[in-house]
Image (cartoon, rainbow, N blue to C red):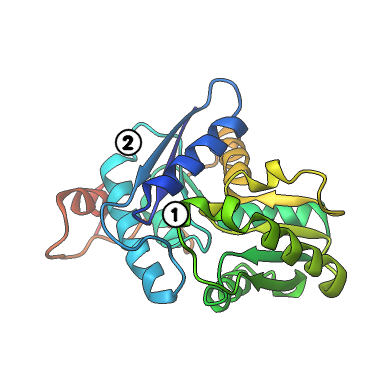
Amino acid sequence: MKLLFINPNISDSVSDLIRAEAMRSASPGTEVTVLTAPFGVAYIETRFEALIGAYAAAELAAQHHAGYDAVVVAAFGDPGLGGLREALPCAVTGLTEAALASACLLGQRFSIVAISQRIRPWYRETVHASGLTGRLASIRGLDEPLADIGSVQTDQGERLVRLAQRCVDEDGADVIVLAGAPLAGLARGLAGRLPVPMVDGVSSAVRHAESLVALRPHRPTGGSFAAPPLKPNRGLSPALSLLLAAGRTP
């Protein structure tokens, strides 16, 4: 089985964290490839940055999806996930979708611990779009600038633990979701530090992607995730043009 993780931001240090946790989580025989966006921002906090990240993810997916059994959007918030699910011939999931699915299997109410305050509105909208607002206990985030996105875990680890503990004590969380690719692997390192389960988006995405591939679902030809219809287009990269044209009918 071959999984393609697409990091829709430009931080190679974050891609290294994604790769390390994905390889630790993968089943024997599963191959993991991680690609980093060639353009965009260091890390995604806002809706507009997510828009840029979605386009970067689409470009990379169009260029590299062939030969992979599943594609993972490797940023919390899953920028571009729905569109990629329409267009790609393989299974597609994202860190948020996978992490929330895991959280719902572990408890009734979950809290999200994030790397910034600004990111919270977008995350809340992402949870709402997943239909899980009723199970969201809270979203808490760090309230100081990040010196280095690749070292958030070491620089801010204890603050993140305290935020998570407040989610349990004050917000009634049964599960903590550690949000964002920069926190990949932190749940593993903090095992036993909190009284409730912690969920990692990367490890969840690996396992859910493996399950999707093993289920061998039929690619939809109807419904809202059928492939986009054939229509004139202009200015797209050759890879995107080919992806839009593949198997389409007028």
Q: Left or right? Give the position of 123 relative to 92.
A: right
Residue at left 73%, top 73%? 138
Exactly how many numbered labels are in the figure?
A: 2
Residue 72 to residue 75: above or below: above
Q: Where does the image place residue 170, in percent across and percent down from the top left?
A: 84, 74
Q: Residue at x 19, y 54 (%)?
A: 241
Q: Which residue is tagged 1? A: 85
**In the rendered structure, which amino acid carries the disc numbered 1?**
Arg
Image location (x, y in percent) of residue 89 = 39, 44
The residue wearing badge 2 is: 66
Residue 28 seen anywhere in this rendered image of the structure: yes
Give the percent coordinates (x, y) of residue 181.
Answer: 52, 52
User: Mark 1 or mark 2, which is nearer the start of the sequence?
Assistant: 2
- For the residue pair 111 and 164, the one nearer the viewer reads as 164
Alpha carbon of mark 2 to alpha carbon of mark 1: how far?
A: 14 Å
In the rendered structure, which amino acid carries the disc numbered 2?
Ala
163, 25: nearer the viewer: 163
Q: Regarding mark 2 in the picture, which secondary structure is present there? A: loop
Relative to the observer, which residue lies in front, 25 or 88?
A: 25
Say which residue appears at 62% left-offset and 74% top-offset.
Answer: 128
